[in-house]
Image (spheres, helix red, strand yellow):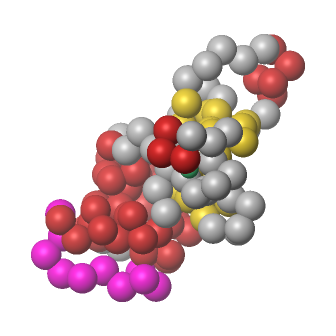
């Protein structure tokens, strides 16, 4: 996982950044899509210094440019970040609390040409 990040860093000729690595690692390990607030929370456990909001956005933009992660937005335009995987990603978004969750279901071939699919469905908590 970190290899892919390293390749992109070399290609783009940017400096290594420990905080960028942490953010990428957090997204690699998460099965759910994370908001910036959630990423910051998780990073606080792993990184001794406080990562500023600007830095997080900068790193996320970089990871998106590298096509390592992508962003989806809920109905309120709140952004969630997810790791890119080879298969089509399918998400459930709760219309009540807007929590985005990655799910695994079979999809028909017609849907496979999409980069990702979002379903609107109430989450466990809101049912
Ligand atoms: Zn909900």
**Residue 15 forms part of the magenta stretch:** no
Side (left or right) of 116 relative to 86? right
Residue 19 appears left or right of 120: left
Give the camera-side residue of 108 and 60.
Answer: 108
Residue at screen point 63% across, 48% down: 94
Q: Residue at x 50, y 75 (%)?
A: 57
Main SS type for the magenta part?
Answer: loop
Name the outermost residue toward the left. Answer: 48
Above or below residue 106? Residue 55 is: below
Which corner quadrant holds the C terminus? top right
Q: Which residues are magenta?
A: 46-55
Residue 125 placed where, x, y %? 48, 45
Q: Is residue 126 above or below residue 43?
A: above
Quadrant housing the N terminus: top left
Q: Position of residue 89 (x, y in %)?
A: 62, 34
The residue lying toward the viewer, choosing from 15 and 117, is: 117
Residue, far front: 127
Comparing 60 with 92, the one in front is 92
Residue 12 visible, this angle? no
- Residue sitting at x 72%, y 17%: 107
Q: Is 106 in front, or is 1?
A: 106
Location of residue 20 by image quarter: bottom left
98 w.r.t. 111: above or below: below
Residue drawn at 67 percent across, 39 percent down:
121
The answer to whether residue 37 shows anywhere in this view is yes
Q: Is residue 26 above or below residue 32?
A: below
Identify the image quadrant of residue 40.
Answer: bottom left
- Count of marks overlaid on the render: 0
Image coordinates of residue 18 in percent, x first then y, are 25, 68
């Amino acid at each position: 996982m970190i290899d892919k990040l390293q390749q992109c860093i070399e290609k783009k000729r940017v400096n290594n950044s420990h905080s960028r690595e942490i953010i990428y690692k957090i997204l690699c390990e998460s099965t759910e899509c994370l908001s910036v607030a959630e990423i910051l929370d998780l990073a606080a456990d792993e990184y001794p210094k406080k990562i500023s909001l600007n830095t997080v956005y900068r790193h996320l933009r970089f990871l998106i440019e590298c096509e390592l992660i992508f962003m989806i937005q809920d109905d309120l335009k709140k952004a969630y970040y997810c790791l890119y995987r080879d298969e089509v990603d399918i998400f459930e978004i709760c219309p009540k609390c807007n929590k985005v969750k990655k799910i695994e279901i079979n999809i028909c071939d017609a849907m496979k040409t999409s980069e990702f699919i979002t379903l609107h469905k109430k989450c466990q908590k809101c049912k």
